[in-house]
Amino acid sequence: MQNGGRTAIACALAWLIPGAGHLYLGKKAKSIIFFAVVTLTFFFGLAMDGRVYLASPEQPLSYLATFANLGVGPLDLIGRQLSYERIIFRVPDEMDRALYGEVLDRTRRRILVPTHEYGTTFILTAGLMNILLILDVFDIGVGRKA
Amino acid sequence: MLGSHILTLILFAGLVSLFFATLSRDTLREGTRLGSVMFASMVGVSLLIAYLMYFFPLG
């Protein structure tokens, strides 16, 4: 397979499963550590009642936070299900009163937990770390890094 | 454990240090050194800032 295709597969794997891109490129020891660190950080965050972000046009920075959350790959879906008991990526329209009220209520319940901010930081950090892993896999794939 | 501020700080610093040490160093010796410095820096600076904040009045 050409180098570009191999790099693309490695990057996709790195996004799907933390550390899988490094495993694909033959870095077994590193991949085990990356998988353990990213998933532990993510689940510690959830255990501390952290939450994943929802994008909202009224809060432009929420798009960046949502992007960082999505960096962790399909694990993000677990975070959304546990945070809001449904898989959503945007703050529901206020006109949809039932859904909007439900999401607001679940958010409020989590915010009231003293460790909420820590947990949310852990979850964001897990996503950002996995984005760095994807970039690292890309650099290794194109030969910029050994 | 997850309710303790200091243990949460140590846990976070440990995970992030291990991540960056593994990401940016290839040998165990170099990685251990970088990870230790990062961990000590994060915990040390956090405690220093926390101590300095003690002098600011609440409210």
Image (cartoon, coloured by chain):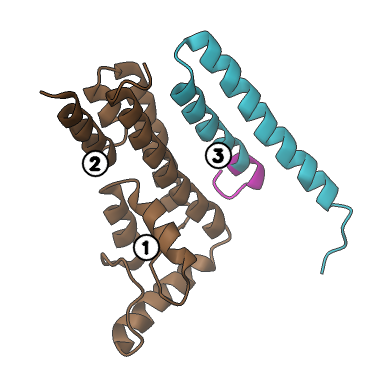
Q: Magenta region: which residues?
A: B1-8
Badge 3 element: helix
> What kind of residue is marked 3?
Phe
The foreground one among A49 and A76 is A76
Q: Is residue A101 visible?
A: yes
Are the residues under marks 2 and 3 on the same chain?
Answer: no
Q: Nearer the viewer, residue A5 or A67?
A: A5
Secondary structure state at the residue bearing disc 2: helix
Q: Are marks 2 and 3 in contact (CB under 8 Å)?
A: no
Label 3 marks which chain's residue?
A: B
**Mark 1 or 2: the one toward you:** 2
Q: In terms of image quadrants, where is residue A19?
A: top left
Residue ID for mark 2: A16
Q: Give the colour of chain A.
A: brown
Q: Mark 1 vs mark 2: which is more N-terminal? A: 2
B24 falls in the magenta region: no
Residue on which the image places disc 1: A83
Quadrant of the frame with the N terminus of chain A: top left
Neighbour tally class for label 3: few under 14, some 14-19, many 20 plus, Cα within 10 Å: many
Residue receiving disc 3: B12
